[in-house]
Amino acid sequence: MTERRWALGILLALGALAFLPLSRARDDVLNFVFLILLSITLAQSWNIVAGYAGQVNLGHAAFFGLGALLARVLWIRGTPIVVAMLAGAALATAFALLIGAPAFRLRGAYFAIGTLALGEILRTTVNNVLPEISTLPAATIAGYQLRHRYYLALALAAVSVVAVTVLAGSRAGLGMQAIREDEEAAEASGVGALRLKLTALALSTALAGLAGGLFAYYHISYYPSHPFGPHWTFDALLMTFIGGVGTLQGPVLGAILYVVLKEYLAVRWVDFHLLIFGALFIAIVLLLPGGLVQAAERARGLVGRRGRRPL
Amino acid sequence: MPLLEVDRVSKGFGGVLAVSGVSFSVAAGELVGIMGPNGSGKTTLFNLIAGALAPDGGRIRLHGRDIAGLAPHRICARGIARTFQLVRPFAGLSALDNVLVGRLYGRAAGGRAAAVAEAERLLVLVGLDGRAATPAARLTLIDRKRLELARALATSPELLLLDEFMAGLNPAETATAMTLVRRLVADGLTVLMVEHIVWALMDLARRILVLSAGEKIAEGPPQAVAADPNVVDVYLGGAPARA
Ligand SMILES: Nc1ncnc2c1ncn2[C@@H]1O[C@H](COP(=O)(O)OP(=O)(O)OP(=O)(O)O)[C@@H](O)[C@H]1O
Ligand SMILES: [Mg+2]
């Protein structure tokens, strides 16, 4: 039930952000919020398969990249962007289902390593086949509206939050969590693990593909292999872990903190910010495996205990 | 037709034959006990029946239909539920959610509200009233065992496999557990139970199978099995028995 409350709160906050462009906010503010919104979607998409179903996908960037790749091509040739993004998401999901069944035969660390390798293979392939930078046509650049990107990002972040809220409260979501906790015990309790893991992967990669399409719509020029880069995976992973893996609010809080911190650190300690994030990540995994969500719970527990203590 | 027929089933791990040509059957409504020294293949036999392992040879039939080698969730759907010797609750989920998994994915029909009501009833039945919201990881060993039982029952099984359910319980808790098992059988459930606590098994089961080194060495009423020279030999002689 607290999940519902978080969902409501987050959606209200997203709703409020819809007024930001109307307030004549500077472009750099809109760009910054855009980045947070894109990150929320990407983190939330990773959270579905890793946080809920317990399958640590280290090749997540592949699906972000595939979404970006197809959406960019279709959109530049005149397809409406939403249609192009949906097509990109469909491609990402189709690919995910193709590799899903064999990949899920690998368990635990092997699944993580297998997906990592897959992502890198895809990135290298795209890099070889499409080595040229992709730049928008001059006419498109002339008519470029940051607001459109911003609102699409807002809508997509909302979609990701609603999707995870619905999932978390559903039978399928419960089955996925059971698999995460103990696949064999889940199977013994009637849970068809393979089918549910594929469902989680499909949902996760569809969202990642949509996020990739948004990336393709936003950037004026980039190398087609760039969205396939492993840092997209690790960004999503870090944000989810910082916030709280397997919760609705965790990836949202994590994305905000991560983007803000990264921007701040990148300005001041250009060379060190990766190191700092690495250290932060290790500290979280060791000290607070539940991320910010767990930290808040602990703090509340401490306060509550003090409150209940007889005078 | 018996509910469960195990017909010359075998399973090896590398060179070790963990279960070797074991046959027996269980009629609906029966409570059958299995005993045997450590490593005699009891858990492996359960894993074969529940689908966690596929047999190398032999047949396992439920209501006359072969189930050997089916995925565990399909066997659960056919009506067999189990508990694990080393408890395996969903640690991060609440007690209620643990049982809800069994209810929502088992054979029971009905909506979410009915499922929650039934899960709550089962928590009370096993003695976990008031624990519904507690994460399974925070329950004591006994309570985690109770939770596993509730989760298994939630799938609406016809046949329940209990693997050393009483191990680690004190005498009072054992007595409570025995009452509970008796009640389940009285309500129509068929139970196959592995137990090291011999007096509990003698008291509960009308029929006991004895395994040794993967083979069935005796089968019959408790008194007859206890007097069987093969059994006496295994428990007092060569093979190591649990203290
Ligand atoms: N997954 C496995 N891989 C390899 N060997 C196994 C496996 N499971 C069981 N064995 C071996 O099979 C034999 C039977 O083991 P099993 O666990 O079935 O015995 P058990 O009767 O349940 O013993 P206990 O009373 O200790 O629970 C043992 O020699 C064990 O080491
Ligand atoms: Mg055993």
Image (cartoon, rainbow, N blue to C red):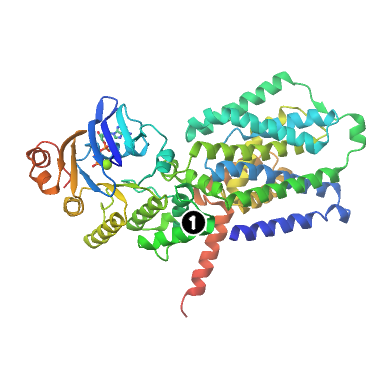
Say whether residue A59 is left or right of residue A34. Answer: left
Q: Where A299 sits versus A68, above or below?
A: below
Q: Amino acid at mark 1?
A: Ala
Q: Where A151 sits versus A219, above or below?
A: below
**Disc 1: residue Cβ within 8 A of ligand 2's nearest atom:** no
Q: Position of residue B195 (x, y in %)?
A: 23, 48
Using the image as rendered, state which of residue B124 and residue A31 is in the foreground: B124
Say whether residue A210 is left or right of residue B26. Answer: right
**Ligand 1, what quadrant?**
top left
Q: Chain of mark 1?
A: B
Using the image as rendered, state which of residue A66 and residue B4 is in the foreground: B4
Q: Residue under circle 1?
A: B115
Mark 1 residue element: helix
Q: Residues within 10 Å of mark 1 (few under 14, many from 20)?
A: many
The residue that appears at 21% across and 60% down in the rendered structure is: B171
Quadrant of the rendering where the N terminus of chain B is positioned: top left
The residue that appears at 26% across and 61% down in the rendered structure is: B176
The residue that appears at 89% across and 33% down in the rendered structure is: A140
